[in-house]
Image (cartoon, rainbow, N blue to C red):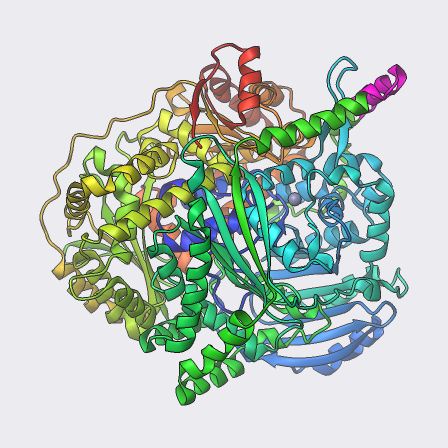
Amino acid sequence: MDRTALLRSLACNRFFFRSARRLSRPCSSLSSRSASSSAPKRHRLIPDRSSRRSLLRQRLASSTSSLNFRRSLSSLSPRAVATPPAHSSSEFAGVQDEVAEKLGFEKVSEQFIGECKSKAVLFKHKKTGAEVMSVSNDDENKVFGIVFRTPPKDSTGIPHILEHSVLCGSRKYPLKEPFVELLKGSLHTFLNAFTYPDRTCYPVASTNSKDFYNLVDVYLDAVFFPKCVEDFQTFQQEGWHYELNNPSEDICYKGVVFNEMKGVYSQPDNILGRAAQQALFPDNTYGVDSGGDPQVIPKLSYEEFKEFHRKYYHPSNARIWFYGDDDPNERLRILSEYLDMFDASSAPNESKIELQKLFSDPIRIVEKYPSGEGGDLKKKHMVCLNWLLSDKPLDLETELALGFLDHLMLGTPASPLRKILLESGLGDAIVGGGVEDELLQPQFSIGLKGVSEDDIQKVEELVMSTLKNLVEEGFDADAVEASMNTIEFSLRENNTGSFPRGLSLMLRSIGKWIYDMDPFEPLKYEKPLIALKARIAEEGSKAVFSPIIEKFILNNPHRVTIEMQPDPEKASRDEEVEKEILEKLKSSMTEEDLAELARATQELRLKQETPDPPEALKSVPSLSLHDIPKEPIHVPTQVGDINGVKVLQHDLFTNDVLYTEIVFNMGSLKQELVPLVPLFCQSLLEMGTKDLTFVQLNQLIGRKTGGISVFPFTSSVRGKEEPCSHIVVRGKAMAGRTEDLFNLVNRVLQEVRFTDQQRFKQFVSQSKARMENRLRGSGHGVAAARMDAKLNVAGWISEKMGGVSYLEFLKALEENVDQDWEEISSSLEEIRKSLLSRNGCLINMTADGKTLTNSEKFVSKFLDSLPSNSLLKTASWNARLPPENEAIVIPTQVNYVGKAANLYETGYQLDGSAYVISKYISNTWLWDRVRVSGGAYGGFCDFDTHSGVFSFLSYRDPNLLKTLDVYDGTSDFLRGLVMDDDALTKAIIGTIGDVDSYQLPDAKGYSSMLRYLLGITEEERQRRRGEILSTSLKDFKEFADAIEAVKDKGVVVAVASPDDVDAAHKERSNFFQIKKAL
Ligand SMILES: [Zn+2]
């Protein structure tokens, strides 16, 4: 995950919370760079809304993901412009059919999909029955994906372990991890794999055709001919094994998936989601965990694992997707090479997903979750109501109506079900994801966390009575209009963030296709949407939605109520059980057995730590430096002036949408007000103005715009003491609504009144709940922020607004809101006063030239209305946390370990080679030692080129001090590095891939603005690119001296379990200051 983005720029952005939650889903927390820097939109037709259940499991793709945001803003940016709509030609259709026939495919169906301006052809491979969807259009961000139906029978995690393992070497690519080689040395815009409860997807994307086909070939060879089905050690490494370093020590479990899932099972929200899914589907494959239950994973045998691959990773059981502007014949040619090697199999019958029958009576389940001892345990209960909505899949119209209903009930803070639950004061935050339609049968779930033991019943009653009320009274007409506009805007804009559009479409299509339904239908939303709108217009929204709530929810007996109880002993009890099993095992073993196990442990480690031979590495195809453009990606930027305010304009095709950022300088804010800033941002959007309630304000924003968000952005600026710190107001609207957009921004900024004490209290509780969640799920981000706060002022500010300090602030604030309200309210007003001025304001706009020109008069009017007081420059915030090592103790079974230092303070001068080198360290040294042999889910380093802070971080790590030793060994690793030209070229190309990462137009405009704010010029970008391209082995050796500073002077922060911190203290006394955070 992109910790920088997370900590610095978006701490209270509503969009961001959404993505933050989504990213904290299992397996995706350190997702690939493409999925990391902004919200990966899922394939849902209706814009995704809030914390959904963890259905999707995503492979940890890049250990360098954290660098991307910084890179994209600091040096360069992407080349792709949004593709203007154009029809793809079908003149050659006849020729294509002939080619397809010759290659062994028959055409099943062909359609033009207006919604994505694409020609889509469904083929069947005659020999095996493999189905191929070939989508052609002019999007240069090409996407390939192969999907297998992989329903598990138990919770040993076979599908998940297999997903990891097939990417560890194959017939044509016989090295340890071709996947990592691709991460290092390709221009991919997406590279990852997902495990769902019933399927496994392998998608790749690239804008470079040669690179794209390389990626496709490596993935095809990996899924069909992986080494892991012959190599037991891969299974051990990725799945599970017993580890015994020395016969005198204790045996322990190791394995990447094993540890990853231990992390997942430490998080209450994940435990809840899993319990709900399993209880809703007791009779089919969804009743077990495809990701693997750490207590069950060690029951998995290698034979079962191999058999699962043989059965399900077969063309007959595959669905294959191609998308983009490449040659459709080439796609079939590549595929036929692989598919022709197989015959038809019976897998499609065996992998069919059974339907779950509906219950005749509701049931109730009580689960324990591991909690800390701090706080009032009585108030830490969670309760969630879950329904299985139907005994069969729904038709598209009903699904669309359900999605719409979901948005109406829960989509915004003003939505009634959400609002009533939060305002009830019965809990801190919403749990349950609303309507979930990714599986064969749809579900609905809603509840609260932070609930008092005595209020469980009340929450259940409130959910039911609110739903009944909605049936009787229907929805407000303005609310319906706002939801309709939001959904239409989102469909039209099709803004998938850094997630390739073709992948978003693939996931949408696969959601039906995987169940043998029509793969075209989910892509065609226009007709059902028009029909739904017409019905609402004719019959009224009540007539449309009330029967749905009644039928699918209120009168539906298939309901599971889950209560989660905090249990401070659970974590240590689970650990105890595991220890006992292992002790029993050890005592049953003879001396020879133990010696043999120690030998096998050694052997595995040796294998993991032995680099691949150069011949094997060469087998992975790569581009050459000649394929790489010498110039950075250009973003048109015109710097102008309106009413004395700087205005940046980016003339890009945006399909008639105007994107804007209005930026205010935080520099004159009093230091003690910094922690209030995120709550200030939320108050602006969710407290209401002098003549609009917050519900009306939200509906107005929903009706007129594509959304407005407000969030702080903070970063160091290279060569300057003063950090760059701003509040960003971000908005988007159709070109014809520009005036409305600026009017609304103005009302939000100037007319909102900070008087609603009750709402403010809710914001505090919600933020606290969210921070606690982050600490458990993204402890590496929290550790990184903490280290930054010790090393620079920008880091200190960010930590105050999103780190452990912020959590402490929120806890104290929660206690004192009532008695201090007057003061808090006037502090919020003071923040506004110190920000809101034409001085220090900057406007950024991204749209086509005509829209930009038309917008200027509204910008001018907007600026006229701003106060023009000159902002007082306060004494600079020269604040940092004390530079001592810290252990943040939380109830967890896995750790997050960080170590960092500022390289600029030791005299290091930035050179582009640093990007190449830090990526290389992450993908080789840290990947091998921290992940592969250390058993952590991830390990990476991050160089913030603005502040100079170089940090090492691990993720879901079973170790603590051992990981620090690995970090300290980095400079020696670099000094002893032997690297041939081929490896160096790959490292350079991979870095360029990061730097040129694909961005949609709004992201380009935003990145360009950040570069402007941080003083990164075009000349500098060009120079850095030159330095990256000319990186040599000598640079690696020199960098070793620079990062020696981390070893010698670095500060350590670990977010860790109490037991591991104790053990560490026994080994190195007083190594850490200890802080209990949960
Ligand atoms: Zn995983």
Q: Which residue occupies the extreme left position in the image?
A: 869
Residue 1015 appears left or right of 161:
left
Residue 700 position within the rendered picture, expressed as x and y whole percent measured from the top left: 28, 69
Residue 540 position within the rendered picture, expressed as x and y whole percent measured from the top left: 40, 85
Note whether 294 is above or below 134 in the view shown: above
Q: Is residue 509 visible?
A: yes
Residue 337 appears left or right of 368:
right
Residue 943 position within the rendered picture, expressed as x and y whole percent measured from the top left: 47, 32
**Ligand 1 is in which quadrant of the figure?**
top right
Q: Is residue 629 visible?
A: no
> In which image quadrant can residue 1023 be found?
top left
The verdict on residue 596 being magenta is yes
- Give the camera-side residue of 205 and 853: 205
**Secondary structure mostly seen in the magenta stretch:** helix
> In which image quadrant can residue 769 be found?
top left
The residue stretch that appears in magenta: 587-603
Residue 268 position within the rendered picture, expressed as x and y whole percent measured from the top left: 53, 43
* Picture residue at 47% right of the left edge, 72% below the top: 404
> In which image quadrant can residue 122 be found?
bottom right
- Give the camera-side residue of 36 and 442: 442
Note whether 90 is above or below 890 in the view shown: below
The verdict on residue 325 being magenta is no
